[in-house]
Image (cartoon, grey):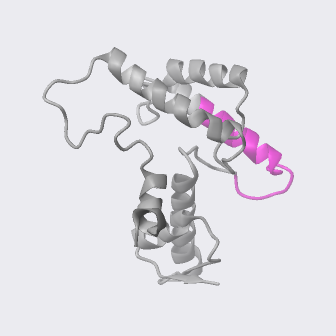
Amino acid sequence: MTDATDPMADLERQLKPYRDKFPSFRELPADGLARAEVTDLVERLASAEEHTWREGYASGAVYHGDPGHMAFLSTVYAAQSQSNPLHPDLWPSATKFEAEIVAMTASMLGAGQAAGPPVVGTVSSGGTESILLAMKTYRDFARERRGIAEPEIVAPVTAHAAFDKASRFFDRPTRTA
């Protein structure tokens, strides 16, 4: 089988398109790169990748690619990049922002319109973490409120990969449908 028809070689080319085009590091260099070199490398890689998502080949990955919005997000991130919600004594703004996001989301979903327990929530860093947190919550709820000692995850084969990660992480079997 030639390299041109080898599916594994083709897959490797797709997954590692920068091989031999950009520096590659397998260990920490004895002397770190200058900040200008790091910035240059990151900007060159971002530039090489930008056309793909700007042309719409990024289902569910980029939600708003407007340059003005991206500049706004960069400013907000720069202002909060060092905050850590585990230290509300140092960054009470992180707690404020999280509480407001949870309250606004709860309101959009109808909280306060019917009697019931108060709505609680948390902000996570992305899809996988959100699914892991939800699966832990469902598992704990099943144990404490329903007496289900050995919960099982039932998910379609098309479910996000994080459901499989959650089943492995929490040592729960997954049944796909």
Q: Is residue 145 magenta?
A: no
Quarter that holds the C terminus: bottom right
Of 73 and 23, nearer the camera is 23
- The image position of residue 65, as x and y in percent, is 70, 32
Instruction: Give the farthest residue toward the left.
Output: 30
Q: Determine the image quadrant of residue 70.
A: top right
Instruction: Give the farthest residue toward the right.
Output: 113
- The image position of residue 80, as x and y in percent, is 51, 23
Q: Residue sitting at 53 percent across and 55 percent down? A: 128
Of 16 and 166, nearer the camera is 16
Q: Residue sitting at 58 percent across and 43 percent down? A: 123
Q: Is residue 27 left or right of residue 85?
A: left
Of 124 and 24, nearer the camera is 24
Q: Residue sitting at 75 percent across and 39 percent down? A: 104
Q: Is residue 99 magenta?
A: yes
Q: Which residues are magenta?
A: 97-118
Q: Residue sitting at 47 percent across and 73 percent down? A: 167
- The image position of residue 64, as x and y in percent, is 72, 35
Q: Is residue 100 left or right of residue 115?
A: left
Q: Is residue 167 left or right of residue 118?
A: left
Seen in the picture, residue 125 relative to 171 is either above or below; the reply is: above
Seen in the picture, residue 89 relative to 171 is either above or below; the reply is: above
